[in-house]
Amino acid sequence: MPRVTRKAGARSAPARKRVKRLAATKIRKANRHKKPSGLESTVKSWFDEDGIPCKTEFPIGSNPVCHADFLLGKRTVLELHGCHWHAHDLCVKSPLKWQQERRRKDAARYRFFRDQGFDVVVIWECEVVQEPNRVRAMLRAIAANKGK
Ligand SMILES: [Zn+2]
C-alpha cells in the first residue's frame, strides 16, 4: 500500500503540468479543427447566394492566434454564436457557471479582435432562426459597407 501511494505521488507533478498545458491550448485547438455548425452552413450559403466574399475560420493575431468564424472585407469579424453554448443574455437568463465563464471568454475574444483593429459583429442563433430575412439583409448591408 505505501509503495503504491508513493508511485502515484511521483507521477502527479508532471501529470498536473500536462493537464495545465492542454487547458491552455484547448480553445485554439477546438477552433482550428471544428467543423462548420448548421448555423455556419446556413450563413455561409447566404453569403454564397448573395455573392458576398468571406473567409471562414480566419486566423487573426499571432501568439495567440484567434480564429474568427467569418471575415467580411478586410476588417470585419463576424461571430456566429449558438444561444445555449455561448449563453446569449436574451435567451439564457440564469447562466450556469460554465456559461458565465463562456461569456467572459467570448468578451475577451471580442476585445482581442478589436485590439487587432477589427470590427466585431455578433450574430445569435435565435436571430438566424427567427428572423433570417432581417439578419440576411443586415449582412448584405455590412458587406456593401465594408467591402470597399
Ligand atoms: Zn438567443
Image (spheres, grey):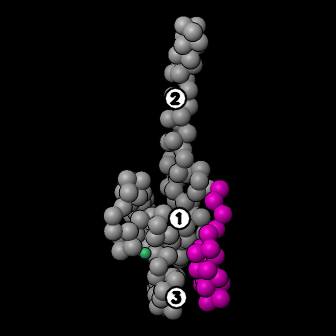
- Residue type at mark 2: give it: Lys
Q: Is residue 82 above or below residue 106?
A: below
Cα separation between marks 1 and 3: 21 Å
Label 2 belongs to which residue? 17
Residue hosting label 1: 68
The residue that label 3 is drawn on is: 132
> What SS does tag 2 mark?
helix
Quadrant containing the N terminus in the rendered view: top right
Q: Nearer the viewer, residue 104 or 114?
A: 104
Front residue of 59 and 109 = 109
State whether residue 144 appears in this view.
no
Where residue 22 sits, quadrant-wise, is top right
Circle nearer the N terminus (2, 3): 2
Residue 60 place in picture, x, y as percent: 52, 59
Task: Find ligand 1 in the image and state its quadrant.
Answer: bottom left
Q: Amino acid at mark 3?
A: Pro
Stretch in magenta: 33-53
Q: CA distance from mark 2 to mark 1?
A: 29 Å
Q: Is residue 69 visible?
A: yes
Q: Position of residue 111 (x, y in %)?
A: 37, 60
